[in-house]
Amino acid sequence: MDVKTTCLGVLVMGDATGYEIRKEFENGPFAHFANGGYGSIYPALTKAEKEGMVTCKKQEQDKRPAKKIYAITPKGQKHLFNSLQIDPGEDKFRSNFLFTLYFADFLPASWIEEIIDKRIAEYKIKIEYLETVNENGECQPDGSPMLVKDMGIQYYKAMLNIVETDKHKFIATALRGENARKEGQCS
Amino acid sequence: MDVKTTCLGVLVMGDATGYEIRKEFENGPFAHFANGGYGSIYPALTKAEKEGMVTCKKQEQDKRPAKKIYAITPKGQKHLFNSLQIDPGEDKFRSNFLFTLYFADFLPASWIEEIIDKRIAEYKIKIEYLETVNENGECQPDGSPMLVKDMGIQYYKAMLNIVETDKHKFIATALRGENARKEGQCS
DNA sequence: GGTTGCATGTAAATGGTTACATGATTGT
DNA sequence: ACAATCATGTAACCATTTACATGCAACC
């Protein structure tokens, strides 16, 4: 899904500026399966406007820069819902963290411990955050956005559990590697 | 992590051709957190050779095209292990599947059911595959590659469980949306 | 006085996917 | 006869990231 279509996805839930869309991608319910920085969002919105998929209203503000509020058009909705009815294909998961752990045998145990501890802390923060969003109840309960958000919580809890369970095993294998390297370079 | 570095990661486990590296990315233990097609792997290997990070031996074969077997050099190893000791950053997860489910309220329930069922089947196949690889025991037990592979299994099992649990909820919310649209366009 | 938040955008560089191009062999 | 596997590679295209550029207001 390209940035243009994910922006349309945000706009179908309500009008927004480029700045607000980006916040959705960073923190909102879209955060864990979509993304985009200013450098991709602003050009995408400009292009979408040219193609008649969104309209744009400039709104002056005092003590704040002017806003450009984008709204989705029927054409934009059609494009979005068509895009959502083609095969979604596989999820893309890229993890430098797992790539690093794969080579734990060759790396300092202290480094492995450091990145695992950091990751555990990050997962805990994300879970806490998502759970407080739930309490605020901005989405109606049992609507699909709420369900997807709950899936996000489940996902992070599962990851946290996996990492916490295996932490000591990774450190142990890294330590074994360190010792093997010390005791002469016997391959 | 760029393709060049992930290729070095495959090569540090043993010599390989571009073709074999790609298979690792598609099926091997790297599959669920790294990737790359021919169009990125071959240029990356050529570049790595120029930079002295790998060496290349051409090997003729009868009844098969000639192979180019790549081997990592000490310089390549240094580059890899240095790359593995900088902050891995966040995992990147992109899911058109979840993006679609987010809008289940606006989509045909039959389509939602179809993609969920398909996804469930895919997860089951992946879990089965990874578990048979475990039985073959190509990695030494308790080494980090094995641990990462087990994390992959845990990950897919968690995802399967989440999707199976929420399947009927998504279909229910999609059906509610369908009915609402039928009963006149009352917003 | 420095950082964060609001708010927009461009340009260059990076990096990756897709499609094309070739061709023999093995299995169904 | 057709598809899949082995095996390499290029070129055009596409998309995204990063860095740059601006500027005021509020908060610490």
Image: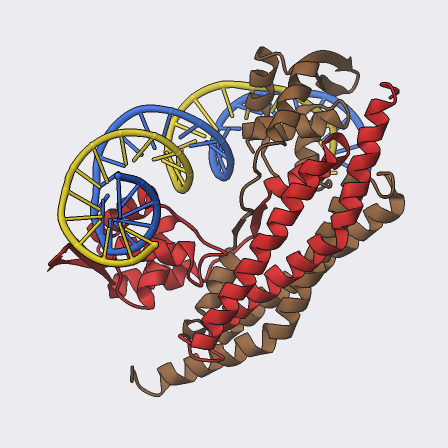
Chain colours: A brown, B red, C yellow, D blue
Where is residue A65, by image quadrant? top right
* Place of residue A125 in the rendered image (x, y in percent of width and height, measured from the top left): 73, 56
Q: Is residue A150 above or below residue A164?
A: above
Q: Which residue ends up furthest to the bottom in the rendered image?
A: A183
Does the rendering let one see residue B41? yes
Q: Position of residue B79 (x, y in %)?
A: 34, 59
Q: Which residue is at 65% across, 71% downward? A: A164
Instruction: Please state the horizontal and vertical placement of residue B96, each as a whole percent of the image.
Output: 60, 39
Is any part of residue A31 visible from this angle?
A: no
Quarter of the figure with the C terminus of chain A: bottom left
**Residue D22 falls left or right of residue B19:** right
Give percent across and percent down for residue D6.
24, 56
How many numbered badges does the structure rendering display? 0
Relative depth, front residue between B1 and C25? C25
Quadrant in which the N terminus of chain A appears? top right
> Relative to A47, is A110 above or below?
below
The residue positioned 34% from the left and 53% from the top of the image is B22
Q: In the visual, does B8 lie left or right of B90?
A: left
Residue at screen point 45% across, 62% down: B85
- Image point 68% across, 13% down: which residue? A55
